[in-house]
Image (cartoon, helix red, strand yellow):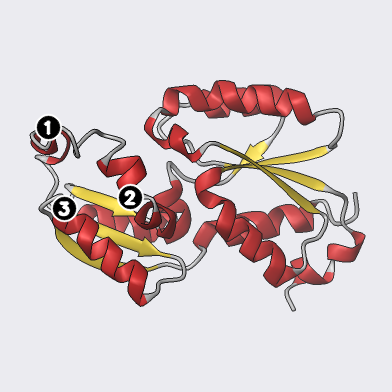
Amino acid sequence: MTAARALDCAAAPILVIACGALSHEIVRLQQLNGWSHMHLTCLDPALHNRPHLIAGKLRAKIAQQREYYLHIFVAYADCGSAGEIDRVLAEENIERLPGAHCYSVFAGEKRFQQIADEELGTFYLTDFLVQHFDRLVYRGLKLDRYPELRDQYFGHYRRVVYLSQQPTELLLEQARSAAGSLDLTFQHRPCGYGDLQSGLELQVLKFANS
């Protein structure tokens, strides 16, 4: 039993406002660690394709929940918001996950940088993005209707790296298929929960006796 789990019974309620792409992993960690005091609400994972909207959506969600929760944590990295998420959270005195995006959250910043340095032209997948690749990437970028857009979006990419959390044979097959549909080579790098787990554990410990 981790220290975070052992202290759970004395912990104050925490609201985690997360990207919907992390919801499955967060719920899994809640179950594994018995974090019954940790409550979860999510924003639409489709914001992954419209990062300029995330900060405003977070601001509205925080305002909506402030009267109900003393402690709020945001399970987002910067996620392409160009610092806008951090500006909102600084105003609200709220912390978030470390890193620039969910890929570095799962891999850990040091390991992700090593992977990125191997090949700058890398497109990344997580369990969630593998499962929803067709909706969020292939159809989301209209490649199903305009296949010529592939070269505009992915012409400078050379490979797909699947940063897996809980890989299965089906997910691996789907990830390989996604790479093939983009005409890119494929690599699998198991990562587990990475900084998502440690970041949430830190919040459990921080507010354990609040």
* Res. 181 mark: 3
Q: Position of residue 10 (x, y in %)?
A: 91, 61
Question: According to the image, label 2 marks what residue?
Answer: 133
- Mark 2 is surrounded, within 10 Å at the Cα level, by few (under 14), some (14 to 19) or many (20 or more) other residues, namely some
Relative side of 186 to 48, left or right: left
Identify the residue under disc 1.
152
The first of marks 1 and 3 along the sequence is 1
> SS of the residue at dot 3?
helix
Q: Residue at x 65, y 39 (%)?
A: 95
Residue beneath the point at 41% across and 52% down: 104
Q: Residue at x 60, y 61 (%)?
A: 197
Q: Amino acid at mark 1?
A: Gln
Q: CA distance from mark 2 to mark 3?
A: 10 Å
Specify whether residue 68 is in view: yes
Where, by quadrant of the figure, is residue 24 drawn?
bottom right
- Nearer-the-camera pick, 67 or 105: 67
Q: Quadrant of the N terminus?
A: bottom right
Tell me if residue 205 comes above or below residue 141 in the rendering. Answer: below
Of the residues under marks 1 and 2, which one precedes in the sequence?
A: 2
